Amino acid sequence: AGLFQSACSGANERTFVAIKPDGVHRRLVGEIIRRFERKGLQLVGMKLLQASEELLKEHYVALRDRPFYGRLVKYMSSGPVVAMVWQGLDVVKTVRTMIGETNPAESRPGTIRGDFCVEVSKNVIHGSDSVESAQQEISLWFRPEELTCWEDTAEHWIYA
Ligand code: IDP
C-alpha cells in the first residue's frame, strides 16, 4: 500500500478524462488537450475508441438508478471517445475545476463546459470526481502497459 501511495499521490496523482462523442464530433479534441498541456499536466495515456455499452454501464454504475442512465450509456456509445490519463499535483481536482460543473449552464466561462456546451446531456467531457474513482476508472479503461511513465523534463519549471 505504501508503495502504491507514493506512486500515485503528490505530483504523481492521476486522473481519467474522456472527451465524449459530442466533443470528438465537434472537433474539440485538440482544444481540450491543449488546455491541459498548457496548464502543465502530464499526459500518460491516450486512445480513441468506440466504447461498448458494457464498458459504459460499468463506468457509470454509480448512476444506474438515475432516470437518465440508459440515455447516458447510449450517448456515450454513439460515437468515438478519446480516453486519457493525466498526471500532476492535485490533478483530479484541477481537472474538475477546468471542466466546470456537471450542468454547462452552471459552468463559468473559462471552463471547458462553460465555453463549449449548453446542455447536461451533451456536456463534452468526463473527468474523475475523486482519487478513488480515478484509480477505478483508469484500471477499467486502460491496461497497465498502455500507460507510459516518462520523465518530465519541464518538471523543475512547473513545480517548486
Ligand atoms: P459529472 O460528469 O460532472 O461527474 P455525474 O453526476 O457523474 O456528473 O453525471 C455523469 C454524466 O451523466 C454527466 O456528465 C452528464 O453527461 C450525465 N447527466 C448527469 N445528470 C444528467 C441529467 O439530469 N440528465 C441527463 N444527463 C445527465
Image: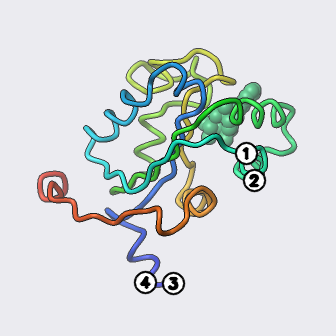
Label 3 belongs to which residue?
1
**Do labels 1 and 4 touch, CB within 8 Å?**
no
Disc sitting over residue 58 in the figure: 2
Q: Disc 2 to disc 4, how far (Cα)?
A: 27 Å
Q: Which amino acid does label 2 sit on?
A: Glu
**Do labels 3 and 4 touch, CB within 8 Å?**
yes
The image shows residue 68 at horizontal and vertical percentages of 82, 31
The residue lying at 37 percent from left, 36 percent from top is 33
Label 1 belongs to which residue?
52
Q: Is the residue marked 2 within 8 Å of ligand 1, measured from its CB?
A: no
Q: How crowded is mark 1: few (under 14 residues within 10 Å), some or many (20 or more)?
A: few
First in residue order: circle 2 vs circle 3: 3
Residue 128 higher or lower than 139, as above or below: above
Q: How crowded is mark 2: few (under 14 residues within 10 Å), some or many (20 or more)?
A: some
Q: How crowded is mark 3: few (under 14 residues within 10 Å), some or many (20 or more)?
A: few
Q: Is the residue marked 4 within 8 Å of ligand 1, measured from its CB?
A: no
First in residue order: circle 2 vs circle 1: 1
Front disc: 1 or 4: 1
Residue 150 higher or lower than 33, as above or below: below
Label 4 belongs to which residue?
3
The residue lying at 84 percent from left, 35 percent from top is 70
The image shows residue 4 at horizontal and vertical percentages of 46, 78
Q: What residue type is labelled 4?
A: Leu
First in residue order: circle 1 vs circle 4: 4
The residue lying at 64 percent from left, 23 percent from top is 122
Q: What residue type is labelled 1?
A: Ser
- Rendered-image quarter of ligand 1: top right
